[in-house]
Image (tube, rainbow, N blue to C red):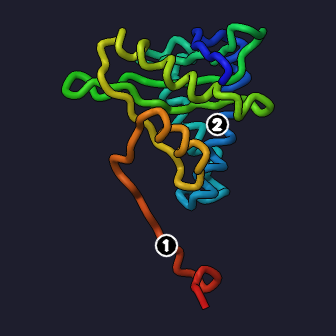
Amino acid sequence: MASAALRPMREDEYHAWYQKAVADYAKDHAAAGNWSAAEALERSKKEFSGLLPQGLASPGQHLYSIVDPDREGSVGMLWFAERGAPETPHAFIYDIVVWEGQRGKGYGKGAMLALEPIVRALGLRRIGLHVFGTNETAIRLYERTGYHATNVLMSKDLDETARPS
């Protein structure tokens, strides 16, 4: 398994990630049937701008580059926020991505484990996240690093093409 560490994201990395993340989030919600394709990009932009109104300096938001100490450049990114304060303060992972070409090398698992001491240092004792049900690779990663389902949303399409014969 490759070694992974987290370092604060740089401004140039943030801008490159942000544009792609907004588009990918829109596609994921449209594919999941949560948003129509026509409205997805605008809704995604609105959510991102609400969460990150000051970019990297947005209060309570923490954006990191995933790095391999043995190579140059980032191999991915991880974004989490402090949520639930003051009643139940916890970290919530909004995004974790290992760049194409770097996947399958253990960077995702390494980043998830490297995140834990950062979250503890903030005085938070729990990490939550959301994963789309179709993202089986991510679900396996989270399970391997000790996460378990706390809520499950399910749906069934009732249109003619979805009915079994």
Residue carrying label 1: 156
Instruction: Check the picture and name the quadrant holding the N terminus.
Output: top right
Q: Secondary structure at mark 2?
A: helix
* The furthest residue to the front: 1
Labelled disc at residue 14:
none
Mark 1, mark 2: which one is toward the viewer?
1
The percent coordinates of residue 5 (x first, y second) are 59, 13
Residue positioned 38% across, 29% down in the render: 127
Q: Secondary structure at mark 1?
A: loop
Residue positioned 51% across, 45% down in the render: 131
The percent coordinates of residue 159 (x first, y second) are 57, 81
The answer to whether residue 15 is above or below residue 40 is above
Front in this rendered view, residue 71 or 14: 71
Front in this rendered view, residue 46 or 123: 123
* The furthest residue to the bottom: 165
Residues under labels 1 and 2: Cα distance? Answer: 27 Å
Residue carrying label 2: 22
